[in-house]
Image (cartoon, rainbow, N blue to C red):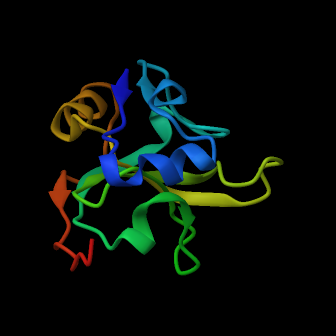
């Protein structure tokens, strides 16, 4: 189980939308990855994971809370602006809407143990790409 890294300054806003440390975490087994973020859940079979890499830092407006990118349908479960892990999928998965019509090619999670999360995924998934680090993005914080 991988806990989210909640930045103190964003806790009140996240709590207002129902996202708290007690109901926000990522679990990983040899069969499935499940990310819970308050009332949102995104899950995928491990064999659907294509790649994984470090991301960040982020602008708060693009990273805090639940966000979906209009450009690539990527989903973010964000609790800080420091950094996270992007998990890319072979087949898009549901996670943003309650009925699963929207599908996401990737999920970014701001877990506390980013390197440990990446290592755990590498241990159970057959990845298409090597783990890489994205270029840092400006942070207004």
Q: Nearer the viewer, residue 87 or 90?
A: 87
- Residue 97 located left or right of residue 28: right
Number of on-image labels: 0
Q: Quadrant of the C terminus?
A: bottom left
Q: Is residue 128 visible?
A: no
Instruction: From the viewer's perspective, tell me whether residue 91 is left or right of residue 132.
Output: right
73 or 124, which is in the foreground? Answer: 73
Residue 19 higher or lower than 104, as above or below: above
In what quadrant of the picture does the N terminus appear?
top left
33 and 68: which one is in front?
68
Residue 40 location (% of width, % of height): 64, 42
Taking the spot 21% from the left edge, 80% from the top edge, the residue there is 138
Give left or right: position of 39 versus 119.
right
Q: Is residue 71 left or right of residue 17?
A: left
Is residue 94 or residue 7 the one in the foreground?
Answer: 7
Residue 137, placed above or below residue 93: below
Residue at position x 22%, y 66% from top? 57
The x, y position of residue 82, in whole percent, is: 22, 58
Image quadrant where residue 113 sits: top left
State the residue lying farthest toward the right. 99
Task: Give how far across and how far down residue 84 sits, in percent.
Answer: 29, 52
Write the residue at 30% across / 33% down. Answer: 121
């Amino acid at each position: 189980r991988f806990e989210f890294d909640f930045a103190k300054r964003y806790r009140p806003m996240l709590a207002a939308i129902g996202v708290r440390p007690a109901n926000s975490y990522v679990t990983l087994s040899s069969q499935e990855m499940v990310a819970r973020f308050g009332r949102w859940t995104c899950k995928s079979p491990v064999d659907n994971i294509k790649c994984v890499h470090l991301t960040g830092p982020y602008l708060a407006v693009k990273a805090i809370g639940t966000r979906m990118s209009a450009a690539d349908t990527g989903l973010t479960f964000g609790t800080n602006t420091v950094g996270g892990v992007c998990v890319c999928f072979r087949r898009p998965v549901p996670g943003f809407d309650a009925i699963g019509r929207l599908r996401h090619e990737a999920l970014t999670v701001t877990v506390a143990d980013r390197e440990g999360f990446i290592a755990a995924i590498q241990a159970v998934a057959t990845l298409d790409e090597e783990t890489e680090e994205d270029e840092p993005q400006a942070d207004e914080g």
